[in-house]
Amino acid sequence: MDEEALKQHIRDIPDFPEPGIVFKDITPLLANADVFRAVVLHLSDHYAEAGVTHVAGVEARGFIFAAPIATHLGAGFVPIRKPGKLPHQVESQEYELEYGTDLLEIHRDAVGNGDVVLVVDDVIATGGTAAASINLVQRLGAGVAGMAAVVELDFLGGRSKIPEGVELLTLVHY
Ligand code: AMP
């Protein structure tokens, strides 16, 4: 994919949601039919031979990419959610934020032994969300086909938090 062309559809919003954060707003990319489809197809094609049984999307913007990728791969969709949102029995994983910690949850019966899961989010920043999501999938006994996101904030070093043996694929770097 042409990284510079993709960047034309990602907008910087300074000081959102709090002072000092430059938010990478992907809504222009999503609103462009050709670009959105190209991103979904590119990420899907990369894993076409990986035997993916499920695509796990990280709440909330990860869902937007994970669901169409799942249908392209002929795989199921699994939500990884913020605490208290999933109705059935969950596995929880704590992860570090800039200040304090938070939790992510997955349904215990969502995936298991023999399943191969691609984990998808929109942005990799510090990598904590991605690492916690991968951990949840692995704790359920499933294999991880990879971690994919549209944007990677290289200067935050999130890539180093991705467990060894899990490939991180990102399309746009800042
Ligand atoms: P992290 O755990 O620090 O890698 O943060 C990743 C999660 O927070 C992803 O789910 C992103 O959607 C969101 N996020 C973090 N930083 C940004 C940013 N600068 N712009 C957009 N989303 C962000």
Image (tube, rainbow, N blue to C red):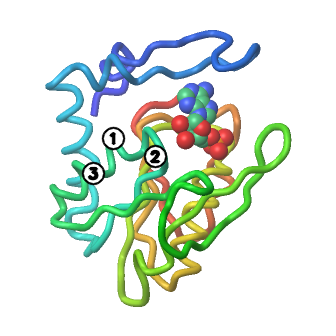
Q: Residue at x 35, y 13 (%)?
A: 8
Residue 110 visible in the current orientation: yes
Q: Nearer the viewer, residue 128 or 109?
A: 109
Q: In the rendered image of this protein, does residue 133 appear above or below residue 26? A: below
Q: Amino acid at mark 2?
A: Asp
Label 3 to label 1, Cα distance in Å? 6 Å
Q: Could you tell me if the residues under marks 2 and 3 are in contact, i.e. CB atoms within 8 Å? A: no
User: Which residue is pictured at 52% across the width and 81% down the height?
Assistant: 140
- Quadrant containing the C terminus in the rendered view: top right
Circle 2 packing at 10 Å, graded few (<14), some (14-19), many (20+), is many
Reply above or below: 24 against 47: above
- Distance in Å between CA atoms under marks 2 and 3: 11 Å
Q: Secondary structure at mark 3?
A: helix
For disc 1, the marked residue is 64
Mark 3 sits on what residue? 67
Label 2 or label 3, whichever comes before in sequence order: 3
Q: Residue furthest bottom?
A: 113
Q: Are marks 1 and 2 in contact (CB under 8 Å)?
A: no
Sequence-wise first label, 1 or 2: 1
Looking at the figure, which quarter contains the N terminus?
Answer: top left
Residue for point 25% across, 20% down? 31
| Disc 2 residue: CB within 8 Å of ligand 1 | yes
Q: Which quadrant of the figure has residue 104? A: bottom right
The residue tagged 2 is 121
Alpha-carbon span between mark 1 and mark 2 = 9 Å
SS class of the residue under badge 2? strand
Q: Nearer the viewer, residue 139 or 127?
A: 139
Q: Is mark 1 within 8 Å of ligand 1?
A: no
SS of the residue under disc 1: helix
Q: Are marks 3 and 1 in contact (CB under 8 Å)?
A: yes
For image coordinates 29% across by 26% down, the residue present is 30
Amino acid of disc 3? Ala
